[in-house]
Amino acid sequence: MLLALDTATRQAGLALYDGEAVRAEVTWISGVHHTEWVAPAIEEALKRIRATAADLTAVAVTIGPGSFTGLRVALSLAKGIVAARELPLLGIPTLDVTAYPHLEGGRAVCAVLQAGRGRLAYAFYGPEATRAAFEGTVPAIADVWGVIAAVNARTEPEPSLVVGELTPAEQRYLVKNAGERSHIAPPALAVRRPGALAELAWRRFQAGDVDDPQALEPLYLHLPSSGQR
């Protein structure tokens, strides 16, 4: 069974996946309290499906973009688990996880997440992207006006589907300034799913494509500042 951990932003989540089904999945807005809540949440998820840490065969983690502190929490915990139990580790880009459930809809997907200090990390996945092959996207970082400019610059006939983390104000700016070129997913569909992380990682795990725990590091798109979390 694969354990998927995501603390890349103020949203936290985890999933347990056995290759056939998501056996357990939970997300919550953790703020800056990832360290306090993730380990107990793992224990509770295992208990709910009558499993133990001995049933784990791999661990997956979002590697960024994301907040400086948030990314470190899940990655450090994941590295500790794989070291203690001699398990494979798989790192998956956060924006890939955000976009994954929305692919194959015949339109471009713009995945976004909060990057701190009023900035957004984002990446586009073309309308030809499928869940089987969509790697190679290039993430960028900008304020909401930069994201609006990027959305408006797309040339596909269908508006881009924007998914992920947007504040209410950012959503209003998008609607007002890129309303003809974008469609914003509602909150229940926009949330980043740990189950998607688990499924992406499981594919790599089955192919034997795992990461070196010693070398795996977070993906940052900017340098952290002393006041950033």
Image (cartoon, helix red, strand yellow):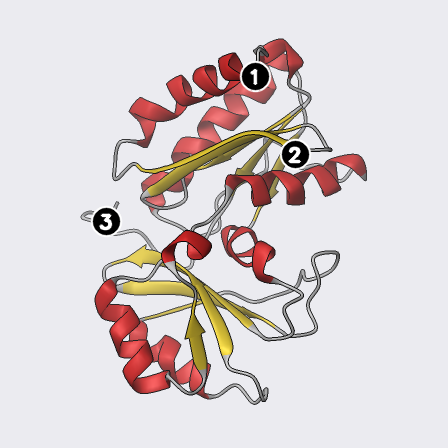
Tag of residue 49? 1
Judged from the image, the secondary structure of the residue bearing numbered disc 3 is loop
Judged from the image, the secondary structure of the residue bearing numbered disc 2 is loop
Identity of the residue drawn at 35% across and 45% down: 68
Of badges 3 and 1, nearer the viewer stands 1
Q: Is residue 78 visible?
A: yes
Which label's residue is closer to the chain start, 2 or 3?
2
Disc 3 and disc 1: Cα gap in Å?
A: 37 Å
Tag of residue 228? 3
Amino acid type at image mark 1: Ile
Q: Give the residue at the far right of this rendering.
A: 207
**Residue 163 image point, x, y percent:** 45, 63
Q: Is residue 222 visible?
A: no
Q: Are marks 2 and 3 in contact (CB under 8 Å)?
A: no
Which label's residue is closer to the chain start, 3 or 1?
1
**86 vs 166: above or below:** above
Amino acid type at image mark 2: Asp
Of badges 1 and 2, nearer the viewer stands 1
Q: Are marks 3 and 1 in contact (CB under 8 Å)?
A: no
